[in-house]
Image (cartoon, coloured by chain):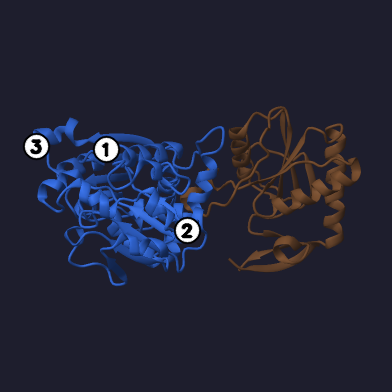
Chain colours: A blue, B brown
């Protein structure tokens, strides 16, 4: 994430990164996972830098993960939660950005329900902006931590097959994940009922409505959270019917390849998109994803903030 | 950055003798090798530390644990690097009460050694930390000195010292020269 492009001081989506950049993030993250096993899990690399977590949407794991990552690099962390801030009094995003700029922060991690907000923020701030999820659009650090987790389990990802299963229409995890997996030379299958698929998918993504047909040829089964609020939109008839066709249960797992990796971005609806026994099975890499999240976010912060002024 | 050679200051045999002498000095000063740990600073400190460990084993018949340390995360000049690359670090699990010898190829400003000491202390509390270098070229910016030196090499700041080791560079030699 060095280099000529001014964009490289930010991480807005996976498209910002070349394959070489992705490799560098994953390699650096591997070193940071070693730091996390030390007695003192902290290094001084970002001492004196300030990172703000600007969260306009509820989040536990992503916010905590960014917070832990920044603290383990010795950065100072400010947490901003919209519901307990002046946003409640009507302060605009632009005014919040100007306040942060005046305070001299070095990086802003933003999560926002509206797609494109991190790009807007980048126009007002001359510091690094990291997208921690914008609307239904992108979630680049999730895509990177998923690649890291898959690589730890499977080794080289070239030619491997991943199925994203479930609510792809509303999933920023899947949107960034598609791009990241395709960029690493993986085959990608989107498995969902037609009502939960977006009208357009990236070139190269195969579509299937039949999970049972897809499972035996996959190296990774990536189960997406069913957003229960979507039930009200009438996207599928009932939770029972959804589970019958799209839940990963033990019976379906038996049809999978022996070393198949089961992933989920969390939080899980046990018994809905994933059976509880599957979530706890050795195939599941769900807690490994959480650990990878800290290492990958440390790597991203380190690579974006650890370098000198680049004249941009 | 390129390198224009002015002179070859150590040959393969010189390096071999220096490593052996350092091993003897380490054993003598620590009264044996039972509580020793050698830690090589990446990159060339790593093969040097393995060679010293082999020499100690041949002198004392004791296998000394050897660690590898990447100091990138502890550098105080991180902001000057175009693209920092972090590599693997491995230290033996228990440093408590051990005599840790940091091994590096060249001692110059002392900043790498300071970073290495910070890193080692994050892993545990050794009884002592000592420093072994193949070449001491002077120009310290911190109050740090080496306990074991292969060769003292007075240099000007404009000069560069390049240590080549078979494991990394395919030959054993030390050159003095200028950046191209």
Q: Are marks 1 and 2 on the same chain?
A: yes
Q: CA distance from mark 1 to mark 3?
A: 20 Å
Q: Residues within 10 Å of mark 1 (few under 14, many from 20)?
A: few
Q: Is residue A27 above or below residue B73?
A: below
Residue A75 appears left or right of B120 = left
Which of label 3 and label 2 is nearer to you? Answer: 2
The front one of A9 and B62 is B62
Looking at the rendered image, the quarter that the C terminus of chain A falls into is bottom left
Residue beneath disc 1: A103
- Give yes or no for contact between labels 1 and 2 (Cβ–Cβ under 8 Å): no
Q: Which mark is first along the chain, 3 or 1?
A: 3
Tags 1 and 3 touching, CB below 8 Å: no
- Secondary structure type for disc 1: helix
User: What is the chain identity of the residue bearing mark 1?
Assistant: A
Image: A89 above or below B108: above
Q: Earlier in the sequence, mark 1 or mark 2?
A: 2
Question: What residue is rendered at 47% in x and 58% in y?
Answer: A24
Residue A254 locus on image (x, y percent): 43, 54
What residue is pinned by disc 2?
A: A24
Q: Are marks 1 and 3 on the same chain?
A: yes
> Closest to the observer: B172 or B47?
B47
Q: Nearer the viewer, mark 1 or mark 2?
A: 2
Q: Could you say which quadrant of the image residue B57 lies in?
A: top right
Q: Chain of mark 2?
A: A
Task: Tell me the distance, in whole angstroms, between the alpha carbons under discs 3 and 2.
Answer: 41 Å
Counting residues from the start of the chain, the first of labels 3 and 2 encountered is 2
Instruction: Give the chain of mark 3.
Output: A
Q: Residues within 10 Å of mark 2 (few under 14, many from 20)?
A: many
- Disc 1 vs disc 3: which is toward the camera? 3
> At 26% from the left edge and 51% from the top edge, which residue is drawn?
A244
Q: Secondary structure at mark 2?
A: helix
Q: Which residue is mark 3?
A: A90
């Amino acid at each position: 994430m060095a280099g000529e492009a001014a964009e490289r001081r930010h991480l807005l989506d996976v498209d910002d990164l070349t394959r070489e950049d992705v490799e560098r993030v994953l390699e650096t993250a591997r070193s940071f996972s070693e730091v996390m096993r030390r007695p003192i899990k902290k290094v001084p690399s970002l001492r004196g830098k300030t990172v703000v977590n600007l969260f306009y949407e509820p989040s536990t794991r992503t916010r905590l993960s960014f917070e832990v990552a920044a603290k383990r690099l010795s950065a100072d962390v400010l947490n901003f939660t919209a519901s307990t801030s002046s946003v409640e009094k009507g302060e605009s995003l632009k005014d919040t950005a100007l306040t942060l700029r005046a305070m001299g922060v070095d990086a802003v991690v933003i999560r926002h329900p509206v797609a494109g907000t991190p790009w807007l923020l980048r126009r007002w701030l001359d510091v690094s902006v990291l997208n921690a999820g914008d609307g239904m659009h992108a979630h680049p650090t999730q895509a990177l931590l998923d690649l890291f987790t898959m690589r730890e389990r499977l080794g080289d990802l070239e030619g491997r097959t991943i199925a994203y299963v479930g609510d792809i229409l509303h999933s920023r995890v899947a949107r960034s994940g598609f791009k990241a997996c395709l960029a690493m030379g993986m085959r990608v299958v989107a498995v969902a009922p037609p009502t939960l698929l977006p009208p357009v998918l990236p070139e190269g993504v195969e579509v299937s409505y039949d999970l049972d047909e897809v499972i035996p040829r996959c190296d990774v089964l990536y189960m997406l959270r069913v957003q229960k609020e979507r039930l009200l939109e009438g996207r599928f008839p009932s939770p029972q019917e959804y589970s019958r066709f799209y839940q990963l249960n033990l019976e379906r797992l038996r049809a999978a390849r022996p070393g198949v990796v089961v992933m989920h971005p969390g939080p899980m609806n046990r018994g809905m998109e994933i059976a509880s026994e599957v979530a706890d099975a050795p195939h599941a890499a769900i807690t490994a994803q959480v650990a990878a999240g800290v290492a990958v976010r440390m790597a991203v912060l380190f690579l974006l903030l650890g370098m000198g002024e680049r004249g941009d | 950055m390129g390198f224009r050679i002015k002179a070859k200051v150590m040959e393969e045999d010189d390096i071999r003798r220096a490593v052996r002498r350092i091993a003897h000095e380490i054993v003598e000063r620590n009264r044996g090798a039972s509580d020793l740990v050698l830690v090589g600073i990446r990159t060339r400190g790593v093969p040097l530390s393995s060679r010293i460990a082999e020499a100690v084993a041949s002198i004392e018949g004791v296998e000394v644990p050897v660690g590898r340390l990447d100091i990138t995360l502890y550098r105080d000049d991180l902001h000057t690097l175009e693209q920092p690359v972090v590599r693997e670090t491995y230290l033996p699990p228990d440093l408590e009460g051990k005599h840790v010898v940091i091994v590096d190829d060249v001692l110059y400003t002392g900043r790498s050694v300071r970073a290495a000491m910070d890193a080692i202390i994050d892993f545990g509390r050794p009884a002592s930390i000592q420093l072994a270098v193949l070449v001491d070229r002077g120009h310290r910016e911190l109050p740090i000195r080496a306990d074991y030196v292969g060769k003292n090499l007075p240099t000007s700041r404009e000069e560069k010292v390049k240590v080549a080791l078979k494991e990394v560079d395919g030959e054993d030699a030390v050159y003095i020269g200028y950046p191209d």
